[in-house]
Image (cartoon, grey):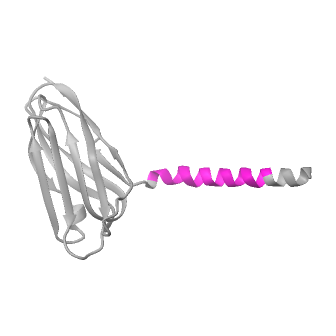
């Protein structure tokens, strides 16, 4: 009886170790939307560009995201569709900039009966002008990724940080 318990506990321990190993080793392959670069510093009067990048995505057909910032510090100059989704075919691209509240809302989707895009790439480039000194988060919210079957793609969103001197 003791031998059976020892074997069962040993097998259970090995299974737990293997599951933990595969879970931890696969966390780098999770789908993410990230602000790139994640941290930057410029002075008042300068312009800079950040991109929203997607990584490790499968079958991406459409996406949406809101990037929030401090409008006392930053002003949006341009919003340009990235090359990632366009690599799969024709796209619909739309954005709304609110420099009063401080956000950019962007959405994009492929057009037609086609498969989604796989991999890693740039979703959008956003150029800012630094109005004044200060620091603010470049926060991502309302993010969604959908596949060609209109099913949500599980992902994480990682914002960034901006700092300006005078």
Is residue 53 inside the magenta stretch?
no
Residue 15, by quadrant, is: bottom right
Q: Is residue 19 above or below residue 39?
A: below
Residue 152 location, x and y as percent? 34, 59
Residue toward you, 56 or 166: 56
Residue 111 location, x and y as percent? 19, 71
Residue lying at 20% horizontally and 72% vertically, measured from the top left: 89
Q: Is residue 84 above or below residue 78?
A: below
Residue lying at 32% horizontally and 69% vertically, measured from the top left: 149
The image quadrant where one finds the C terminus is top left
Q: Residue furthest top?
A: 166
Is residue 21 inside the magenta stretch?
yes
Residue 96 location, x and y as percent? 11, 48
In the visual, does 77 lie left or right of 125? left
Q: Residue furthest bottom?
A: 113
Residue lying at 13% horizontally and 56% vertically, measured from the top left: 94
| Extent of the magenta region | 9-28
**How many numbered marks does the figure carry?**
0
Residue 58, by quadrant, is: bottom left
In the visual, does 96 lie left or right of 149? left
Residue 50, by quadrant, is: top left
Residue lying at 29% horizontally and 53% vertically, measured from the top left: 144
Question: Could you tell me what secondary structure mostly forms the magenta stretch?
Answer: helix
Q: Residue furthest front?
A: 150
Residue 104 location, x and y as percent? 15, 44
């Amino acid at each position: 009886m003791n031998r059976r318990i020892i074997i069962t506990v040993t097998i259970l321990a090995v299974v737990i170790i293997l599951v933990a190993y595969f879970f931890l080793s696969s966390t780098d392959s999770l789908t993410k939307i990230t602000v790139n670069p994640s941290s930057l510093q410029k002075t008042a009067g300068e312009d800079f560009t950040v991109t929203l990048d997607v990584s490790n995505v499968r079958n991406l057909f459409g996406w949406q995201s809101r990037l929030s910032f401090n409008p006392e510090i930053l002003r949006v100059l341009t919003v340009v569709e990235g090359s990632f989704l366009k690599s799969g075919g024709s796209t619909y691209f739309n954005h709304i900039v609110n420099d009063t509240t401080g956000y950019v809302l962007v959405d994009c989707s492929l057009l037609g009966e086609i498969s989604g895009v796989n991999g890693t790439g740039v979703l959008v480039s956003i150029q800012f002008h630094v109005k004044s000194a200060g620091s603010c988060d470049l926060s991502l919210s309302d993010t969604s990724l959908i596949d060609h079957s209109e099913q949500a793609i599980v992902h994480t969103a990682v914002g960034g940080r901006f700092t300006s001197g005078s």
